[in-house]
Amino acid sequence: MPISDDHHEYSVNLSRTGDRVAKLEAPGISETIEVATPPQFPGGVEGVWSPEHLFTASIVSCFFTSFEAIAEYSKFDFVDLKVESSGTLEKKDGKFVMSKVLLKPVLTIRDESNKKKGIRLLEKAEQICLITRSVKADVHLDPAIVVEEAGS
């Protein structure tokens, strides 16, 4: 599915709701996201999404949407896709950076003969993800394929 033009904008608005806590909203989206300083930092808040979570989430969700588009375009039939992800924050040259994101997709398919194609499509999804191409962090893919047993 081609993108209709070469320029898109995505608005996100932030409103402070408390000490080190804010609410994110976007026009046309009914849900809001609460965001805060992560608990690893002074004054950080437990149990709330942090910018570091959202950074990692943007990469894993872009990987997902890229895979869905490629699978549809390739007429690739699959049962399920689950992806564990983790982002690494570390100090480099005295400054914190998100240096690495690990994506661990588990693709469930029905037919053993589609394993190689499934791996290729997962790799392609990682390569074409526009968020991955837009960040400095290294993104590593560690894919796995599960063949669903008949009658499962």
Image (spheres, rainbow, N blue to C red):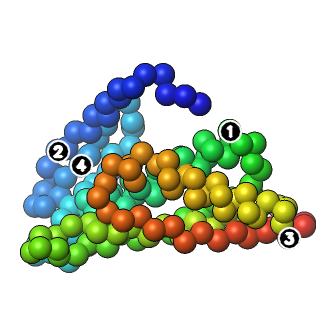
Tell me whether the residue at label 2 lies in contact with that at label 4, contact meaning CB atoms closer than 8 angstroms.
yes
Secondary structure at badge 4 equals strand
Instruction: Return the disc, 2 or 3, that comes first in the chain's sequence.
Output: 2
Q: Is residue 152 visible?
A: no
Q: CA distance from mark 2 to mark 4?
A: 5 Å
Closer to the eye: label 1 or 2: 1
Secondary structure at badge 2 equals strand
Residue that label 1 marks: 73
Q: CA distance from mark 2 to mark 3?
A: 49 Å
Residue lying at 17% horizontally and 58% vertically, measured from the top left: 21
Tell me whether the residue at label 1 lies in contact with that at label 4, contact meaning CB atoms closer than 8 angstroms.
no
Instruction: Return the disc, 1 or 3, that comes first in the chain's sequence.
Output: 1
Q: Amino acid at mark 3?
A: Glu
Q: Is residue 11 visible?
A: yes
Asked whether, in this view, residue 17 is left or right of residue 108, the answer is left
User: Percent position (x, y) of residue 60?
Assistant: 46, 58
Tell me whether the residue at label 1 lies in contact with that at label 3, contact meaning CB atoms closer than 8 angstroms.
no
User: Percent position (x, y) of residue 139?
Assistant: 41, 64
Q: Quadrant of residue 2?
A: top right
Secondary structure at badge 1 equals helix
Q: Amino acid at mark 2?
A: Ser
Q: Pick the residue in front: 65 or 7.
A: 7
Q: Amino acid at mark 4?
A: Lys
Q: CA distance from mark 1 to mark 2?
A: 39 Å
Residue lying at 45% horizontally and 68% vertically, measured from the top left: 140
Instruction: Return the disc, 1 or 4, that comes first in the chain's sequence.
Output: 4
Residue that label 2 marks: 15
Tell me whether the residue at label 1 lies in contact with that at label 2, contact meaning CB atoms closer than 8 angstroms.
no
Residue that label 4 marks: 23
Residue that label 3 marks: 149
Circle 3 packing at 10 Å, graded few (<14), some (14-19), many (20+), is few
